[in-house]
Image (cartoon, grey):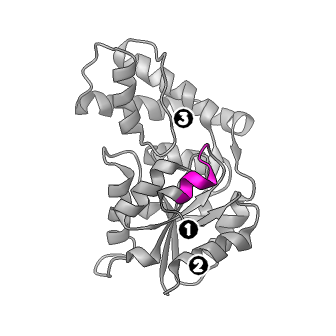
Amino acid sequence: MSRLVLWNVDYTLLDAGRVMRAAYAEAFEKVTGEPLVYLTSFEGRTDSEMFFEFCARNDTDAEPDAATLERFLTELEGAFVRREDELRDKGRAMDGAQAALGAVAAMPDTVQTVVSGSTRATATAKLRAFGLDPYLDLSVGGFGSVNYPKSSLIQSIRLHAAGEGARAYTERETVFITNAFADVRAAIIGGAVPVGVLTGSATEGRLREAGVTEVLKDLTDAHAVTRAIHQVTAV
């Protein structure tokens, strides 16, 4: 059976929150001329979605249109690149992340990539910093470089990940592994089966209430990760 395994990046595979907060603040002030005083939750959000909420919560005079968003994303990438050296000091890969990715990569007929709220360049830099990128086909990933919700990114990956002319991955063949409550809804709308990981703020009960049937405590048991994937894709 062919499988498409999608991973959320932040707080599922790694934690770069301290570095990202500084990069958001720098980029926001450069684009709007105002300090970023009020943040918003990162979990399950794209950088595009967060920018518009930043503008609303911080009462800025900047016009939150497509052109301003593009400038923000460009400045954000630059701000993050300037902080890449800080990642290993202030960030970390989640326990077991590398072994879990390796185990999934070894599954037959499986394509493995990410659905990230960050832009392609930022997400790639984060994964590369902790040696996670070799296990992933980032050429078919979904990123916050475009102003679409994660559900649309998931749907697009399903349609195109198998290559030109190949059939789309079905919902039963597609898995989205995430810690974020909002991502569970994105998975269901986008046509993927969600698998929950308790590495964020969402409780097991809340994830199950949203529609998750398989919940992992963390990624330290690589066999449990592959077993969960087998369970939710079993016909």
The residue under the point 35% across, 17% down is 32
Compare residues 232 and 45 and report the one nearer the observer: 232
Mark 3 or mark 2: whose residue is earlier in sequence: 3
* Residue 79 drawn at (x, y percent): 51, 28
Residue 14 showing in the rendered view: yes
Distance in Å between CA atoms under marks 2 and 1: 9 Å
The residue under the point 39% across, 20% down is 57
> Which numbered marker is on residue 169?
none
Lateral position of residue 31 relative to residue 123, left or right: left
Mark 3 or mark 1: whose residue is earlier in sequence: 3
In the picture of the structure, the residue carrying the numbered disc 1 is 213
* Residue 115 drawn at (x, y percent): 46, 56
Q: Residues within 10 Å of mark 2 (few under 14, many from 20)?
A: few
> Which numbered marker is on residue 81?
3
Q: Are marks 2 and 1 in contact (CB under 8 Å)?
A: yes
Q: Which residues are magenta?
A: 201-208
Q: Amino acid at mark 1?
A: Thr
Disc 1, SS: loop
Distance in Å between CA atoms under marks 3 and 1: 38 Å
Disc 3, SS: helix
Q: Are marks 3 and 1 in contact (CB under 8 Å)?
A: no
Name above or below for residue 205 compared with residue 195.
above
Compare residues 123 and 65 and report the one nearer the observer: 65
The residue under the point 36% across, 56% down is 151
Q: Nearer the viewer, mark 3 or mark 2?
A: 2
